[in-house]
Image: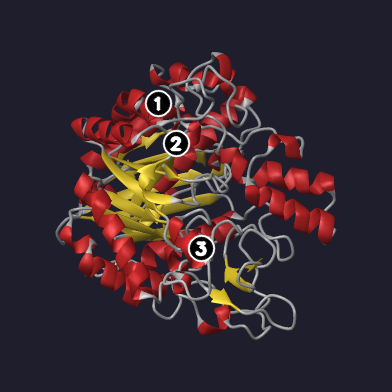
């Protein structure tokens, strides 16, 4: 066991500030709203808040386009509000991890304003500028948000790279001055007392030469570039290693072998990474995430079990079902068709994830079993990714009909995760007295925190119990992982072993009773279950049960 490993034992709760709690009636969540709900989070038992961006931003991509890294967006409040939130969280034993968005900035950041002002500006090569090719962009590289990854800038007659929206130009990490500016900014926040960073698309900061070549080619892979580990080691040496903090890197495209480097046990880079293999298992070859395809449990198990065993002893795992970029977990992996099935499957999913090895992340509202929201037209949407995908798949390529695309958006769109947190059954789910920036899910009348906090049978109370168990039983944190019945299409059964103890987790990912196989024998002490009474011969629909022996 190395030093500074409190993050292995922690449970982390992600707050999407714009949708969490509004204290002013503006319809936008804010920092004072978060302060007002810290006791709720303390009661839940979480240890760390991961705060999605609250920096100054034009909000083209909901704060992931930052115009000043050392200022708070007035939408969310002031720096004094931030300091108060940090202090109040720390008083309750809750740590604060901020979002670090440094693959790109906003096009309104002073750095970029200077960079685009002339070809010979000192900050010109703080970003990635290229000449066009044969009257078009430098190459055919596509943006993650659809369309070309290159934007022509009239003033200097060159193109700049943007792997995301055109208002999010990519920083040039090959320039040491850029890296030093980022490190100074990180120290500013650490010296203020924050407890770590979740690093946005950190696997993209180093670009392959072919990715940015002005040769008309296709452009290369955008992840895990040639210097990414070198830059993260430098960051660690110059900044991270000087503070008792935690880091988690959003690492799209990461492999298990790459993760062993990013999150190595020696601690020379990051503490852990988010991989996205498991949330991509139901994608379509032609339309990507915009599909109604349903995942297969065998595929889900295969991916997450490979990460569990592949990182054993080499690196630490991050565990999550959903976040601000994913649809709601219970709607995607469970069954939200009736109230009983929603509660049952939400609890089962929680069991399955929280008993694995790694640090579990809860996305706001997941602890209530919040669901996807009804999306009937583009007018219900707010997300730039949705509008770009509609333009490409419906209007330009005509791959999907409007009805097909709307159905896919309802199932997979990011706005599902961004509807207001459901606090109670009053107007706008108790989120705001004003008109919310995005409508509340109409089911808030039945699914809300006020109804669940005092109910011992609620999804909330179930999450509370799982968090408590994690603090009581070292096998949940430290035990190694062994999957049983890997090819079963309905059951996920696995064991954890540590200190002479064995934990058996049995999860039924279907709405049917299943004859109990010998590998899932109900023996030992029942630690937790989403049923009050269990069957020795059958595993019940959406059952999630854990035994210790």
- Which residue corresponds to mark 1? 33
Image vertical order of residue 21 relative to residue 137, above or below: above
Q: Which residue is mark 3?
A: 302
Q: Position of residue 477 (x, y in %)?
A: 27, 50
The image shows residue 526 at horizontal and vertical percentages of 33, 37
- From mark 1 to mark 3, how far is it between C-alphas? 40 Å
Where is residue 181, by image quadrant? bottom left
Q: Secondary structure at mark 1?
A: helix
The residues tagged by marks 3 and 2 sit, at their Cα atoms, a distance apart of 34 Å
Query: Looking at this view, is 123 or 146 the one in front?
Result: 123
Q: Find residue 145 and report its image quarter.
A: bottom right
Q: Residues within 10 Å of mark 1 (few under 14, many from 20)?
A: many
Q: Residue at x 33, y 62 (%)?
A: 182
User: Which residue appears at 50% of the width and 52% of the height?
Assistant: 65
Compared across the picture, whether 436 is left or right of 470 comes to right
| Residue, disc 2 | 17
As measured in the structure, the alpha-carbon distance from the residue carrying label 1 to the one carrying label 2 is: 9 Å
- Circle 3 SS class: helix
Q: Which circle, 1 or 3, is nearer the viewer?
A: 1
Quarter in which the N terminus is drawn: bottom left
Task: Tell me if mark 2 has few (under 14), some (14-19) or many (20+) residues whose alpha carbon lies within 10 angstroms of its own.
Answer: many
């Amino acid at each position: 066991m190395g030093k500074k490993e409190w993050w292995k034992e922690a449970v982390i709760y992600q707050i999407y500030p714009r949708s969490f709690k509004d204290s002013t009636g503006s319809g936008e969540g804010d920092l004072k709203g978060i302060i007002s709900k810290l006791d709720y989070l303390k009661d839940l038992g979480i240890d760390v808040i991961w705060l999605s961006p609250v920096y100054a931003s034009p909000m083209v991509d909901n704060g992931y386009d930052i115009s000043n890294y050392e200022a708070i967006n007035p939408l969310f409040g002031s720096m004094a509000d931030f300091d108060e939130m940090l202090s109040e969280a720390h008083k309750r034993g809750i740590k604060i991890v901020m979002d670090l968005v440094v693959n790109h900035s906003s096009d309104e950041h002073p750095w970029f304003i200077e960079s685009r002002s002339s070809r010979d500006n000192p900050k010109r090569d703080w970003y990635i500028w290229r000449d066009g090719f044969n009257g078009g962009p430098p190459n055919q590289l596509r943006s993650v948000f659809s369309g070309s990854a290159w934007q022509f800038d009239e003033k200097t007659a060159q193109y700049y790279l943007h792997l995301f929206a055109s208002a999010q130009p990519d920083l040039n990490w090959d320039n040491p001055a850029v890296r030093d500016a980022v490190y100074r900014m990180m120290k500013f926040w650490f010296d203020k007392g924050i407890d770590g960073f979740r690093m946005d698309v950190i696997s993209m900061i180093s670009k392959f030469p072919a990715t940015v070549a002005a040769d008309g080619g296709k452009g290369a892979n955008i992840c895990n570039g040639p210097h990414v580990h070198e830059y993260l080691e430098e960051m660690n040496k110059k900044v991270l290693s000087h503070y008792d903090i935690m880091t988690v890197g959003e690492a799209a495209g990461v492999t298990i072998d790459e993760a062993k480097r990013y999150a190595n046990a020696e601690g020379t880079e990051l503490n852990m990474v988010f991989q996205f293999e498991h949330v991509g298992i139901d994608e379509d070859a032609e339309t990507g995430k915009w599909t109604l395809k349903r995942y297969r449990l065998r595929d889900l198990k295969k991916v997450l079990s490979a990460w569990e065993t592949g990182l054993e002893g080499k690196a630490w795992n991050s565990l999550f079902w959903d976040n601000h970029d994913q649809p709601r977990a219970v709607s995607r992996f469970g069954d939200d068709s009736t109230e009983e099935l929603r509660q049952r499957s939400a609890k089962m999913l929680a069991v399955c994830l929280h008993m694995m090895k790694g640090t579990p992340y809860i996305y706001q509202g997941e602890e209530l079993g919040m669901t996807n929201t009804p999306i009937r037209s583009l007018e219900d949407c707010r997300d730039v990714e949705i509008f770009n995908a509609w333009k490409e798949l419906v209007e330009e390529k005509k791959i999907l009909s409007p009805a097909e695309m709307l159905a896919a958006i309802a199932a997979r769109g990011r706005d599902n995760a961004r509807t207001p947190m459901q606090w109670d059954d009053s107007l706008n789910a108790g989120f705001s007295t004003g008109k919310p920036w995005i409508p509340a899910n109409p089911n808030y009348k039945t699914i809300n925190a006020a109804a669940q906090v005092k109910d011992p049978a609620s999804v909330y109370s179930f999450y509370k119990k799982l968090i408590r168990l994690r603090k009581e039983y070292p096998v949940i944190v430290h035990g190694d992982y062994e999957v049983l019945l890997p090819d079963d299409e309905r059951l996920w059964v696995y064991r954890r072993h540590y200190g002479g103890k064995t934990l058996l987790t049995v999860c039924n990912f279907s709405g049917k009773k299943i004859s109990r196989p010998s590998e899932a024998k109900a023996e030992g002490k029942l630690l937790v279950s989403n049923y009050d009474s269990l069957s020795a011969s059958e595993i019940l629909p959406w059952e999630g049960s854990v035994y210790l022996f």
